Amino acid sequence: MDNQKFKSGFVTIIGKPNVGKSTFINNCLGRKISIISNKPQTTRNSIQGIYNKENVQIIFIDTPGIHKAHNELGKFMNKESYSTLKEVDLILYIVDGTKNKSTQDDFILKQFKKSETPVYLVINKIDLVSDKNKLLEIVLEYTNEFMFKEVFFISALKGENVEKMLNKITEVLDFGPKYYPLDQVSDHPETFIISELVREKVLYLTHEEIPHSVGVVIESMKEDDRNSKLINIRAIIYVERASQKKIIIGKSGQMIKQIGTLAREEIVPLLGKKVYLDLFVKVLPNWRDKELDLKRLGYK
């Protein structure tokens, strides 16, 4: 492909937990590669989502939400977010349009000042704001602290103004190579995305009962010996306490069955085949503070 006709580049998505980063990237790609939860710090790894069109390839890096770290996992998540700032062509700073700027935002803005990478301010959740004057007040809070290249108002959930922003990003990117095949939407293997889908359903169904002490590992994934149209998946859900294991399994195994059912509904279209999902729950005490356990669960 002629690089003088094709544009490409890397764009990192930065923001506090729960501002809609994962919703935005899933909307851009038209499919789920990053899990969505109403709980903070859902995304734990920097996930690359690949937006492809005829003349452009935008590699989005969906980072963990920057937050005050209380354990080794939290430190890893923050390091993942900051490490991308100087390595990309553009930064999207997504903020919640229903909330005012906080001291945590001030801390993030200071990090931007250390980088020469251009930053777009993206005000998300505008569908939840009835008073548009409030949006302008919020924009001034941010622009008084940092010189953004552009400001966009979007609803990642509804898709409002997302295409407009993608067109602007395409406009400013340099001509360059096609980094990934045009049919690829993520740099992560299917096993990683599947483990994230299972973890999402745990967070969704257990509500406040299970905090972020849940990790999921795909122990095996292979085609059935007798049926080539069936994929057998064995996944381990790790928790830190026996009481959490009891909650995830549920009375007579009903909770873990429901987790499996919801996860399978999204895994089937991902793989394009029938899926047998076998879930197990194991206790791994304090795994978020142990280097070896973090590596085992894919966070180091």
Image (tube, helix red, strand yellow):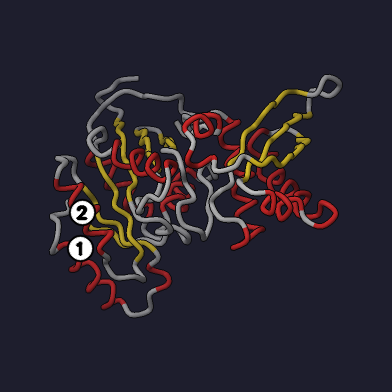
How many numbered circles are shown?
2
What amino acid is found at the position of numbered circle 1 in the picture?
Answer: Tyr
What residue does disc 1 label? 142
Task: Give the mark toward the camera: 1 or 2.
Answer: 2
Instruction: Give the residue at x 45% y 52%.
Output: 41
Residue nearest the observer in this picture, 141 or 125: 141
Task: Choose the circle earlier in sequence order: 1 or 2.
Answer: 2
**Residue 148 coordinates in the image, percent (x, y):** 17, 54
- Mark 2: amino acid: Leu
Badge 2, how many Cα within 10 Å: few under 14, some, many 20+? some
Label 1 to label 2, Cα distance in Å?
A: 9 Å
Left or right, 218 with respect to 140, comes to right
82 left or right, relative to 186 = left
For the residue labelled by badge 2, is the local secondary structure a helix, a strand or a loop? Answer: helix
Q: Residue at x 35, y 36 (%)?
A: 58
Please tell me which residue is depicted at 57% across the width and 37% down the height of the picture.
193
Q: Measuring from the top left, give residue 63's x and y in whole percent.
A: 38, 43
Q: Are marks 1 and 2 in contact (CB under 8 Å)?
A: yes
| Residue 281: percent from left, percent from top | 71, 42
Image quarter for residue 124? bottom left
Q: Position of residue 296 (x, y in %)?
A: 55, 29
**Nearest the camera: 287 or 112?**
287
Per the image, the residue denoted by label 2 is 109
Quarter of the picture holding the C terminus: top left
